Amino acid sequence: MKIIPSIIERYVGKYVVTWILYTTVFFCILSWLIKFMEQLNHIGTGTYTIGMAMLAVTMRIPHNVYVFFPLSALMGTVVSLCMLGSRQELVVMQSAGLSKLKIVLATLKFSVPLMIAVMLLAEYVIPKSEAKYDEIRAKAIKGTDISVGSAGDIWIKEDNKFLHIDHADSDGMVYGVSLYTFDRNSHRLIDAAEANKGTYSEGQWKFDNTVHHKFTDQKLEITSIKDEIWDLSIAPDKFNALSVSADELPISSLWSYVKYLKKNKIESKKHEFELYRKVCSPLAVITMICLAAAVAFGSMRSLSMSARIVLGVVGGFAFYVANQLISPISLVYGMPPLLCVLLPSCIFLCCAIWVLTRR
C-alpha cells in the first residue's frame, strides 16, 4: 500500500513543479517584452540597433529568473493545486492516505532541484550576464568599452589609511591612485601619496612613479619614488563589491567582502543582511510554496480558482513587503541581520503550517 502514496507523491510533485516552470517562463517572457520596449527609446543612439537591444535584454533573462522565481513558486503552486482540487484529485489523494502536509512535502521535495539551480544561477551566471548587458549598452550607446569587473571612483579604508582609486579592474590594474595616511593618535594627516598606475602581483601592490607629500610640524617634504610597494590588504577581486550594490553581488563576493569590512572595523550590517538574505533564499521559496498550499487547501470551498489565486498573490505580496521593511528596521535599530532575515519567513511559514494542519 505504500507504493500508491509514493506514486501519488511523484505525480503531484512533478505536476506542481511543471506549473512553477510554466509560470517562470511566462514572467520572463513578459519581462523581456517590457524591457525590450524600454530599449526602443535608445535605438539609433550611437551604434545601438534592434538586434543589439534584443541581445542586451536577453542577457537579463538569468536575472529575471532569479527575481521572479519566488513569485513563480507561489503562483505555480496555487494554480496547480487549485486545478487538482477542481478535478477532485486532492480528495482522492487524501483518501489514499496522503495528508495535506505529505502533499506539500512532496511538492517541496521536487522543488529542491529548482531552488539549487536558481542559487547556482545567481552565483555563477548572473554576475557575468549583467556585466555583459552593461558592456553591450555602454559600448553601443556611449561608445565606451567597459571590461567585465571594472570599477571606478573607489574609496577604501584600511586601519589609519584612506585609499582613493579613479579606476580599477579585476586583472590587478589601478589608475589615478591616492593614499592618505593619518596619525593614529592625533588623527592628523602625515602623508599623501599619489601614483598614476599600480599593479597587483603575488599578493602585493606595486606602484610606478609615486610622489609622497609628508607633513611635519616644520615643513612639507616632497619625494618621488620610481617603484614602490604599498602595504595594503585589499585585493582586485574586492573592487566589484565596492562599486556594485550589495543586492547584485553573488554570495562568495559578499562573504569575502563582509570579512574585509569586519577586519577593517567598517560597518558591515547592510552587506551581512544581503548575504544572509541570499543564503536563506530557499527558505523564502519554501514559505511561498507553503502559503500557496495553505490557500489551496484552506476551508474556502465557495471561492473560485481565480479568487484563490488573488488571495495567494495578496499573501505573497504581504510576505514581500515584510521582507522589504525588515531591512531598514534592522539597520536603524541595530538588530542582528540573521534574525531579521529569518523572522518574516518563520512567521509566515508558521501561519501556513497552522492552516494546513487544522481540520
Image (cartoon, helix red, strand yellow):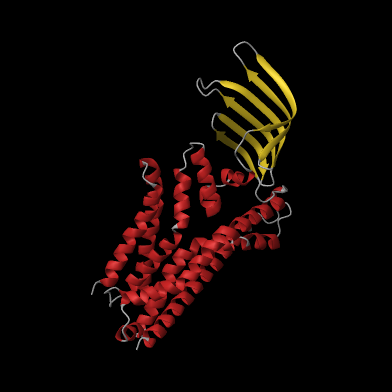
| Residue for point 51% across, 39% down | 263
The one of 270 and 255 positioned closer to us in this rendering: 255
Residue lying farthest bottom? 1
Q: Is residue 111 visible?
A: yes
Residue 298's x, y, as percent? 29, 73
- Provide residue 57's location: percent of width, then percent of height: 62, 61
In the rendered image, the vertical position of residue 190 relative to residue 42, given as above or below: above
Q: Quadrant of residue 6?
A: bottom left
Q: Is residue 302 above or below residue 328?
A: below
Q: Nearer the viewer, residue 52 or 112?
A: 112
Residue extending farthest top: 218
User: In the image, is 330 to the left or to the right of 141?
Assistant: left
x, y percent for residue 34: 56, 62
Which of these two is toward me, 48 or 243?
Answer: 243
The quarter holding residue 317 reads bottom left
- Does the image show residue 249? no
For this orientation, the residue located farthest to the left is 359
Location of the C terminus by quadrant is bottom left
Q: How many marks?
A: 0
Quarter occupied by the N terminus: bottom left
Residue at the (64%, 36%) spot, across then down: 165
Instruction: Kindly indicate the quadrant of the structure image that contains residue 166.
Output: top right
Please, which residue is most extreme toward the front here? 202
Q: Considering only vertical position in the picture, is 71 above or below 1?
A: above
> Does 353 appear above or below 336?
below
